[in-house]
Amino acid sequence: MLCDFHLHTSFSGDSDTPPVQQIERAIALGMERICITDHHDYDVVSDLDFTLDFPVYLSALAQLRDRFRDRIRIEIGVELGLQRHIADYLNDLVRTYAFDYVIGSNHFIDGLDPYLPVFYEGRTEREALRRFFESSLEVVRELDCYDSFGHLDYIVRYCPTRNANYRAADYMDYIDPLLRTLIEKGKALECNTGGYRRQLGHPNPCEDILRRYRELGGELLTVGSDAHTPDYIGCEFARASEILRECGFKYYTVYHQRKAEMLPL
Ligand SMILES: [Zn+2]
Ligand SMILES: [Zn+2]
């Protein structure tokens, strides 16, 4: 099974799963390597606390990495919420702490979470999606603190009609330059299988975007389930592997000490 490089534990404000449970489930699935990537969304307004106490988080994960060393390889990562106004803060963060892998995600757009209905108020769904992809392009262009850009079109998990009216082609004026920017910067694109868990029938991003990334020359591609509970670790990885091969990929990417390594799909 592919290595799962997007996993949450109770260090994240939206997960109650102790890290040990996630690790034991990954071992039971026969996974050889995982990366724990808990949330850190700095300077946002939310009912949940999406920030990490890094010294506590990193020392706890280092202990678990050592404790399970003979059974599974654990990389220590983080999922950072990308926002333009905190670029300096995020750059300092990734210089200060020794992560193996950093996912950059666009979780708050103009201060609003697309998970909540207020994001769609006063505009059409299409306008909301356009602003989402436009702001994704902005953060990918302006920030450099990440290794892989997380779940590119995950907004269709939450928008009013979900993915019923979604066609990636309608947003390619933003998505195409975003993919080109990732390639130019040597950043990876993430294939996040959380879309299957939410009954979208496709990963995030969808196949059209994955295929386009490959056509443009994109090679660095990470894979993650975004599991917040043990039952979703490695969710639909066999299907994702097949889709990615159909899209023209032969390899996917894992990271150690923020250096990319290619593994066969
Ligand atoms: Zn995320
Ligand atoms: Zn996540």
Image (tube, rainbow, N blue to C red):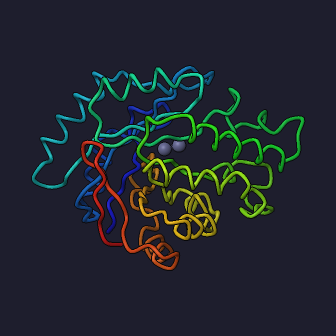
| 203 sits to left or right of 228 | right
Q: Residue at (57%, 55%) from the top-left corner?
A: 180
232 up-or-down from 242: above or below: above
Name the quarter where the N terminus is drawn. Answer: bottom left
Residue 78 lies in what quarter of the image?
A: top left
Residue 234 lies in what quarter of the image?
A: bottom left
| 13 sits to left or right of 204 | left
169 up-or-down from 69: above or below: below
Q: Residue at (46%, 47%) from the top-left corner?
A: 185
Image position, residue 237 (x, y; %): 42, 68
262 up-or-down from 160: above or below: below
* Front in this rendered view, residue 112 or 83: 83
Q: Residue at (56%, 63%) from the top-left corner?
A: 203
* Front in this rendered view, residue 48 or 145: 145
Q: Residue at (83%, 50%) from the top-left corner?
A: 126
Name the quarter where the C terminus is drawn. Answer: bottom left
